[in-house]
Amino acid sequence: ETRVLVVGEPAEADPAIEEAAELLRRGLPVAFPTETVYGLGADCTRADAVARIYEAKNRPHDNPVIVHVAEVAQLDAFCLDLDERVALLAEAFWPGPLTLVLKARPPLHQTVGRGLDTVGIRVPNHPVAVALIAKSGLGIAAPSANISGKPSPTKAKHVFNDLNGRIPLILDGGPCSVGIESTVLDVSGPRPAILRPGWVTGRQLDKVLGVRVQRHGEVGQEKRSPGTRYRHYSPDAPLLLLGPDLSDDDFRMLQSCFLASQGAKLGYIGRRDDAVDSRTLYMRYAADELNRFTKDLYLNLRAMDEEGVTHIIADGFEEEGHGRSLMDRLRRASTSVLLRRNDVIAICNC
Ligand code: TXA
Ligand code: MG
């Protein structure tokens, strides 16, 4: 029932863009690619249009959505109190995977801010997204285009699997190049704060702003960013996240303990190359393949459900730089986090 249109190059010349823009102007939702994940878009100034994206993806009503614009000049239409920091950040990171939380210009605090007085906004780095924004002439409100709670979609077919029959159109612009959602940085107050870690790191932000921005976890972000309250990105199979200190022996103990039960099939995402087993689906990444690991993370979680694995084990990362954003996503996808050998023994005994 949902149509999927592949967008050719150059995107702005493809008739699919005009068709999608027309749907948006009529207040209907359209899914489109960005460099991070696929988004489910609607006219950000229309309450009825925005309501349709909440309904389609079954999103909790208090969780605000971010607005996508094609260029910095469009900010004025949606935000108040733009200052020097915004200019510096836009220059350094846009188009790209950084969302800025700014004071909202009415009516945005109601439509997308869900009662907050702020709006999250970014310029995506994807030709299809930019062409769609430009052609529609709108700011496009867009959360990730998954059913709430599922891993975010990084391919058009993931959107189709989640939302078929619930939205009229998906624009297919190929796989997303980054693979996890944007960094959300609150610059609506005097002290910049990361509300959600992402591909743009704290250290990169510090450098551009010349101050140390507050890191995710230092800010009580549950209050300030409703989305971080929810468990997220979850595959159907329970996922055990292993802290960076667990040894290969610990891993093997877990593996044999899970595989001991009838019909068990294990999924593994990580760096270990031993313990290969015919009932373990292996997704292996060397320590220096962080980009590829990130790009494939949600795709792998979805693939494991499709393959019918009964348990997933994932290796964790040191909480530094990109490792911090990956751990945020993995932790929120996980059912438990095992830090010490005793945690492994406890799981195996129950
Ligand atoms: O990369 C991305 O950001 C993708 C693509 C489609 O652009 N979008 C995305 O949207 O991940 P969503 O809705 O799945 O996540 C947006 C996050 C949520 O955690 C939400 O709570 C937070 O940003 N957020 C949005 N507006 C906010 C605001 N005004 N204040 C605080 N947090 C906000
Ligand atoms: Mg999301």
Image (cartoon, grey):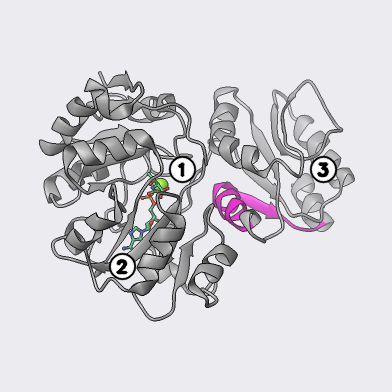
Q: Is mark 1 within 8 Å of ligand 1?
A: yes
**Of the residues under marks 3 and 1, which one precedes in the sequence?**
1
Question: Which mark is first along the chain, 3 or 2?
Answer: 2
Q: Identity of the amino acid at label 3? A: Phe
Q: Which residue is mark 1?
A: 36
Which numbered disc, 2 or 1, marks the residue that appears first in the sequence? 1
Give the residue type that dot 1 points to: Thr
Q: Is residue 183 magenta?
A: no
Position above or below: 36 against 20? below
The amino acid at mark 2 is: Leu
Question: Which residues are the magenta region?
Answer: 324-340
Q: Quadrant of residue 286?
A: top right
Which x, y percent locates residue 120?
A: 32, 59
State the residue position of label 2.
Answer: 102
Q: Is residue 281 visible?
A: yes
The image quadrant where one finds ligand 1 is bottom left
- The 10 Å Cα crowd at callout 1, few under 14, some 14 to 19, many 20 or more, is many
| Element type at mark 1 | loop
The answer as to whether callout 2 falls within 8 Å of ligand 1 is no
| Circle 3/circle 1 CB separation < 8 Å | no
- The answer to which quarter of the image holds residue 88 is bottom left
Q: Position of residue 341 (x, y in %)?
A: 83, 55
Q: Is the residue indicated by label 3 positioned so its CB lies within 8 Å of ligand 2?
A: no
Residue 256 location (% of width, % of height): 82, 34
Q: Nearer the viewer, residue 224 or 210?
A: 210
Q: Residue at x 15, y 52 (%)?
A: 45
The residues tagged by marks 2 and 3 sit, at their Cα atoms, a distance apart of 44 Å
Q: Is residue 99 above or below residue 330?
A: below
Q: Which mark is residue 342?
A: none
Residue nearer the viewer, 47 or 257: 47
- Residue 251: which disc? 3
